[in-house]
Amino acid sequence: MTNIELARFNMVEQQIRPWDVLDTQILDLMEAMPREAFVPAGYENVAYADIDIPIAHSEVMLAPKYVGRMLQALNMRECDIALEVGCGTGYVTALLSKTCRKVFSVDIHQDFVDTASANLKAQEIDNASLETGDAAQGWDAHGPYDLIFISGSIPELPEAFQKSLNRGGRLVAIIGDGPVMQATLITRSAVDEWREERLFETEIKPLVNAAKPNRFVF
């Protein structure tokens, strides 16, 4: 086992599994995916550390345990059509693509789209379609979707996202205002019914142009 393979194994066993990620599909997926191929130059040595890694535009690659927990909640299937809002470097895009039938990923930053496209091509992943655009209020261009993964935080979830889910569709997003935000799973259980489950607390930068709820000031 090489040093990189050992680091990837330790990431799974010491960070992801202890965070109640027990789905073998997710554990195997994250142990097989070379995260070092997706981190910015100069960060290869900490690709498997339990940290958020900074990328451009003051954004981050989420720590592996957060990614694993959110992917596990999605209960991914081979027939799923997925939407990812915010491709970053393409790491989560790659993980989704290895399980889902098709992934549509949209990011407001052209350089992220370019970088993620190159990283996915290097890994010979060809079932992801990347676009540049503002999806903070929703992105129904290819919907309805079975899965939605929102990479940035949002103060509150726009209704458009929930309505673009198929019946039985699942969405994960980090919702709320700092310093405490909730990673949340939304499941469309019927035409006009959605279930909500809170997964964990964290804090990350909001999506560009994310809607801010009106609040009364007394």
Image (cartoon, helix red, strand yellow):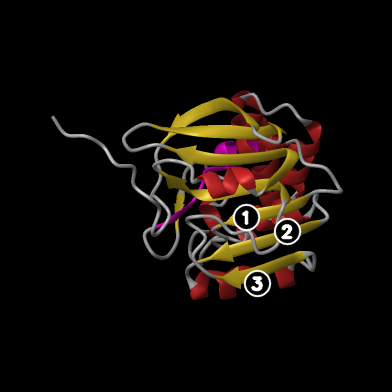
| The image quarter in which residue 190 lies | top right
The residue located at (65%, 64%) in the rendering is 141
The residue located at (42%, 65%) in the rendering is 56
Q: Is residue 131 magenta?
A: no
Query: Earlier along the polypeptide chain: callout 1 or callout 2?
Result: 1
Compared to 216, does 122 lie above or below? below
Residue 150 visible in the picture: yes
Disc 2 on helix, strand or loop?
strand
- The residue labelled by disc 3 is 117
For the residue marked with disc 1, what is the amino acid? Glu
- The residue labelled by disc 2 is 103
Q: Position of residue 160 (x, y in %)?
A: 56, 49
Label 2 near label 1: C-beta < 8 Å? Answer: yes
| Distance from Cα at disc 1 to Cα at disc 3 | 14 Å
Q: Which residues are magenta?
A: 59-68
Query: Earlier along the polypeptide chain: callout 3 or callout 2?
Result: 2
Residue 11 visible in the picture: no
The residue located at (66%, 33%) in the rendering is 187
| Distance from Cα at disc 1 to Cα at disc 2 | 7 Å
